[in-house]
Amino acid sequence: MSQKFQVAGMSCGHCVNAVQNAVQTVDPEAQVTVVLETGHVDVLSQQPRQDLVAAIENAGYRVQ
């Protein structure tokens, strides 16, 4: 299932990697696309949305 997130606080390539890694700790098979300029994060995963949000926020970013 495709899920879309608006993530605040990303400013560099390290941030992109941190968000991708955070999602993949919840679902190692997830496909994650991050658009740094807009803060859009698209995730293809069967995991519950709240688990993905928690992982992103635990990495230090805010899901709006």
Image (cartoon, grey):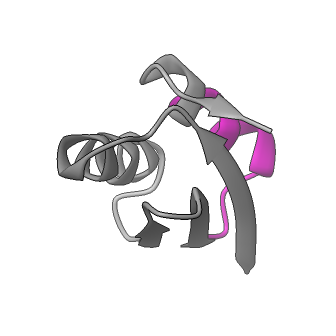
Q: Name the quadrant containing residue 33.
A: bottom left
- Residue 53 sits inside the magenta stretch: yes
Q: Position of residue 13 (x, y in %)?
A: 20, 52
Residue at the outermost left position: 14
Q: Name the quadrant containing residue 47.
A: bottom right
Query: For the stretch drawn in magenta, what is the main secondary structure?
Result: helix
In this view of the protein, which residue sits in the foreground, 9 or 1? 9
Measured along the vertical axis of the image, is residue 35 above or below residue 36? below
Number of numbered discs on residues: 0
Q: Which quarter of the rendering shows the N terminus?
A: bottom right
Q: Residue shown at 40%/45% (left/top)?
A: 19
Q: Residue shown at 35%/54% (left/top)?
A: 20
Which span of residues is magenta-colored? Answer: 45-55
Q: Residue shown at 43%/60% (left/top)?
A: 36
In this view of the protein, which residue sits in the foreground, 47 or 52? 52
- Residue 21 sits inside the magenta stretch: no
Measured along the vertical axis of the image, is residue 55 above or below residue 20? above
Q: Name the quadrant containing residue 3.
A: bottom right
- Whether residue 27 sits left or right of residue 41 in the image: it is left
Q: Residue shown at 76%/51% (left/top)?
A: 48
Measured along the vertical axis of the image, is residue 41 above or below residue 24? below
Q: Position of residue 30 (x, y in %)?
A: 44, 69
In this view of the protein, which residue sits in the foreground, 56 or 9? 9
Q: Which quarter of the rendering shows the C terminus?
A: top right
- Whether residue 54 sits left or right of residue 24 in the image: it is right
